[in-house]
Image: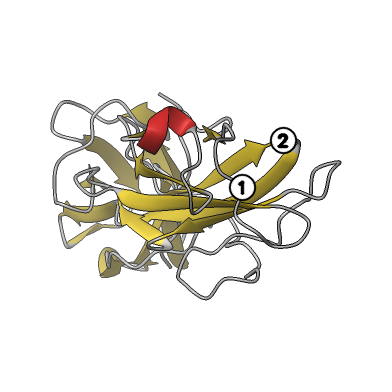
Amino acid sequence: MKDHGRSVIAALLCMGTLAVAGCNTGTGTSSSGTPPVIGTGTGPGTGPGPVPGPTGTRVQLLASSPQMPSSGTTTVDLTAIVVDANGQAVSGTTVVLSTGTDPSAFTSNISGSGVSDTQGTVTAKLNLGSNKSNRFISVTATAQGATGATGVDVTGTAITISGNSSIAFGAPTTLTFSLKDSAGVALPGFTMTLVSAVGNSISPATGTTNSAGQLVATVRCFRGANDTITATAAGASKT
C-alpha cells in the first residue's frame, strides 16, 4: 500500500508539568494535488482544455464531482466527448480511459465497450479501489491521438489523538493516534510518522497502524517550552 502524509497537531506545554494544551483533531483536509484548470465545459470536475489529435480530433473529459470520499463507497461519473476539427460528434471511435499511476483507482461500467456513441460520448465510473489515502486522482481519456483530462480529490481520511492530559516534567505520557477513513472505518497498515517540533522524545517516532488503525506512542518532555507534535499518515494535512 502506498503511504501518503496526513498531519494532526497536538500542542504541548512543558514547564513544571507537561500538559496537553490542545489537540487539533478536526477532519478538514487540504488536497495532495492541484485541481485541474477548467476547460470549455461547465460542470464540476471539468478537465483542462483538450489536446487535439493530428487530424484535429478533440476529447473532453468531465467528472460529475471534483471530490469523492475516502471510504470508497461512492463512485464518480465520467463522460468523455469526442468531436472532430469542426466540433461535430465523432461516433464509433475507441476511447481509452486511464487513472495513470494511482495505486488503486480504476474505471468501470464503460459504455459501448469504450466505443463512442452517436453523440460522441463514452461514459464510465471512477472507483477509489482499496487505497483509502487522501490524494488527487488524475484521469485521462484518449482517442485518435487526442487527449482530455480531469481529476478528482479523495478526501475525508483523518487522524485523531487521545491520551493523558498532563504529566510531570521528564515523565512519560502515552498518546494514541487513530487513523480512519471518511466513514469512520479504521485504517490498518499505514505508515505514521510522529515529530516533536522542539525535539522531545517520542517512541516510536515511526510505526505502522495496527488492526484498529492506531499507533500508540510514548512522549517524554525534557524541554521547558511549548511543543507541537505532528502525526502524518494517509495523504493530507490538518493544522
Q: Residue at x 45, y 63 (%)?
A: 227
* Residue that protrudes farthest toward the bottom in the picture: 42
Q: Is residue 126 left or right of residue 149?
A: left
Which SS class for mark 1?
A: loop
Tag 1–tag 2 contact (CB < 8 Å): yes
Left or right placement of residue 124 versus residue 43 in this view:
left
Q: Amino acid at mark 1?
A: Val
Disc 2 designates what residue?
144
x 37%, y 68%: residue: 15
Report x, y in % for residue 100: 58, 32
Residue 216 position within the rendered picture, expressed as x and y whole percent measured from the top left: 23, 37
Looking at marks 1 and 2 on the same chain, the residue that comes earlier in the sequence is marked by 1
User: Which quadrant of the rendered structure holds the C terminus?
Assistant: bottom left
From the viewer's side, name the closer residue of 207 and 71. 71
Instruction: Name the amino acid type tagged 2.
Output: Gln
Q: Is residue 227 visible?
A: yes
